Amino acid sequence: MRWSQTFIPTLKETPAEAEIISHKLLLRAGLIRKLTGGLYTFLPLGLRALRKVEQIVREEMDRAGALEILMPALQPPEIWQQSGRYESAQGVFFKARDRAKKEWILGPTHEEVVTTLIAGELSSYRQLPRNFYQIQTKFRDEIRPRFGLMRAKEFVMKDAYSFDVSDEAAQASYQKMYDAYARIFHRCGLNTMAVEADTGVMAGKFSHEFMVPADTGENEVAWCENCHYAANLDKASSGTPPTETASGGALEKFATPGVATIEDLARPPYNAPASRQIKTLVYMVENKPALILVRGDHQLNEAKLAGALGTAAFRPAEAEEIFAALGAHPGSLGAVGVKHLPIHADDSLRGGAGLATGANEDGFHLRGVEIARDIAVNDWNDLRLARAGEPCLKCGRPLRIRRAIEVGHVFKLGTKYSEAFNACFLDEAGRKQPAVMGCYGIGVTRTLQAVVEQCNDKDGIIWPASVAPYTVCLTPLSVAPGGPVMKLAEELYAALAARGADVILDDRDERPGVKFKDSELIGFPIRVGIGERSLARGEVELKPRGGPMTPVKAEQAVEKVLEILAV
Ligand code: ATP
Ligand code: MG
């Protein structure tokens, strides 16, 4: 490609809309443009990089035995009713109406569609295992679309769905996808970690997310450098020193005028350390109040709560609901003596004694609380958010927490959808069985931006060769037609193209400084500078992006470039 023939609108200034480096660079390097919040156009360079990511995904999915299909983006709401997700997914739907005013859904994901498909085709165990995938645009009405392609309203996803005869076979399919994902991200030049992920209310299922460590990531990951335990903070467990048990004391009510928080009670004159307090939270669970207890210095993890309750239909209670449930206001709430509400407690409180908590009477607290004696806990679970520095449950070394971008997700689904859609087969013994499913997503457009977020410096993007829009940029410093510089540039251009390199020739009549700046900003892996001065010595200047410039003999330039690109 000749620069003058394509369209690369680079920008000197950073557009105000962009908050994170990758978003800024994609705009500045002329890869994407915004239509409106969460909606972007891919310009020629951006589309080339996107196609390369797609191609890597496709090759690895094919290699893992998955079959590419293409399902409709437009979906009938009936299939969402059939799966039971029509209500819970309302928040993400973009909807459309046809001429008869019938409702349609722009697909945010395709479990319902693919399971409908399989239900119509599957009859015998001999047809399994199967894994179908597609690369397609998804639509989600995100609460906060932001960071360019990272969280968009419309984005390209690769989604795959596996169907197996048994749990064991499904596990093998899952592992294949897990391995394929590791290869895909590695080939894209991304440094990722696979972390255990929350499975929401689908107990017994499990999943991993592929995370790109980045300060701008919207996820937090807890991990152990020693044993490589890694989990999304939604799911992460950690050890905690047991709650101290200064037992023996009697339950005692004491006046705490004006005390409204854990911190207030930790200060003189009360001096109840946060780790010796019980934090009592009131939640409405399927519209009925319930108490959730965690230690005063701990935070509730709502994802874990969903798993423990077996439903995601809960929310913190409003002030009136709290008063109706306990007869007191936040600041003085407690579970001592409460018999009329379900009580869910975090494991770290187990066996605790000598604790302080609210007395369910405004301006009063209790001390000397002994959980086993004084609180009728219905249900113990790991409910708290893990913290950095707490011991890893596997090896005891301190956990670390870092932010990360989720680029992919593998999920063992079980039979939820196959049962709902009657996607069943007859096993060897002639018994009817639901197919055991898995689903596997990669945010293709998000992955592209994650590469930029991870690979850049002060001058611009540093593309890994595998996904670079062009891998070689030929930069003649004078473009006079027929001159020796342009003549050599044309020769190298033809030779590199003939050898299969993705080469762009910067044939613009611009100052060298402008050309160099643009090629650094866009981040082509190799630039070949061709100028009169070096040419007089029979040399061109080879500059890998982010590396030092080295002169090479003009006649060796093609081999040298191909050599660098091969590694
Ligand atoms: P997130 O937690 O980031 O909202 P998700 O868990 O809802 O993502 P999945 O349903 O697992 O996402 O979708 C598979 C992949 O699609 C994700 O791993 C992510 O890479 C990508 N993805 C999801 N939502 C978006 C979005 N709004 N914009 C761009 N990519 C997205
Ligand atoms: Mg996910």
Image: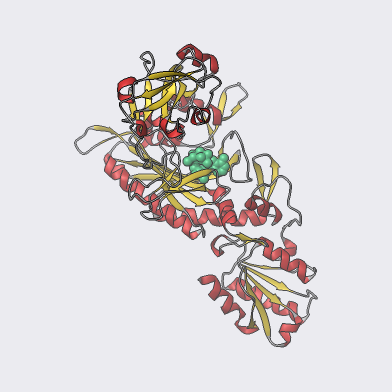
Quadrant in the picture for the N terminus = bottom right
Residue 466 x %, y %: 54, 62
Q: How many marks?
A: 0
In this view, the residue in front, 228 or 448, is 228
In the orientation shown, which residue stands out farthest toward the left? Answer: 429
Q: Can residue 137 be seen by looking at this rendering?
A: no
Q: Is residue 559 left or right of residue 187?
A: right
263 vs 482, left or right, is left
Q: What residue is at 61 percent from the left and 73 percent from the top? A: 496
Q: Residue 306 or 360: which is nearer the viewer?
A: 360
Q: Is residue 438 left or right of residue 450?
A: left
Q: Quadrant of residue 248?
A: top left
- Vertical relation: 20 (above or below) 455: above
Rendered location of residue 187, percent (x, y):
48, 60
Q: What x and y, as percent, mark residue 257?
A: 54, 19
Indicate the quadrant where residue 252 lies. Answer: top left
Residue 104, quarter of picture: top right
Q: Is residue 315 above or below residue 454?
A: above
Going 80% across and 76% down the picture, which residue do you hit?
A: 480
Furthest-front residue in this view: 269
Indicate the position of residue 442 as horizontal and vertical percent values: 49, 47
Colour mode of the rendering? secondary structure
Nearer the observer, 358 or 119:
358
Q: Would residue 8 be visible to someone looking at this image?
A: yes
Task: Residue at 36% x, 42% y: name it.
Answer: 239
Is residue 417 left or right of 258 when viewed as pictured? left
